[in-house]
Amino acid sequence: PQGNIHVPIWDSNTIKVFTPEGTYVRSYGDVKGPYGIVIDEEGYTLITDRTCNCLLVFDPRGNKIHIVENLNGPRGIVLDPKSGGLYVANFDAKTVLKYST
């Protein structure tokens, strides 16, 4: 549901979901080094993974559906709802990548 908080947990390689009140809802993901996270209007979760140098896309139920590989130290991630642009800080390459959603 809208308003849930998705927290990347580095130690357990998962994403934990909580209600705004702090109640645990569920965990999902098969991530190696989750760092940045953003959720689009349709409930898809996009996660930068520092360990595998990739961008992971999960559907609203938490199933991994897409991987963008060969990034170079991805960190921050921002979704611009007006333009539909997805921006990823490719930290080690000192670049910002833009994807169309």
Image (cartoon, rainbow, N blue to C red):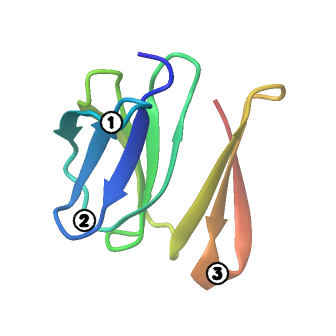
Q: Give the residue pinned by disc 3.
A: 93
Residue type at mark 2?
Lys
Relative placement, left or right, of 88 versus 28 is right
At x 75% / y 27%, what residue is drawn? 81
Residue type at mark 1?
Phe
Dividing the picture into quarters, in which one does residue 76 lie?
bottom right
Q: Residues within 10 Å of mark 1 (few under 14, many from 20)?
A: some
Q: Give the residue pinned by disc 2.
A: 32
Dividing the picture into quarters, in which one does residue 34 lie?
bottom left
Q: Nearer the viewer, residue 59 or 54?
A: 59
Q: Residues within 10 Å of mark 2 (few under 14, many from 20)?
A: some
At x 73% / y 64%, what residue is drawn? 96
Q: Is residue 33 above or below residue 2?
A: below
Label whose residue precedes the other's in the sequence (1 or 2):
1
Dividing the picture into quarters, in which one does residue 57 lie?
top left
Residue type at mark 3?
Ala
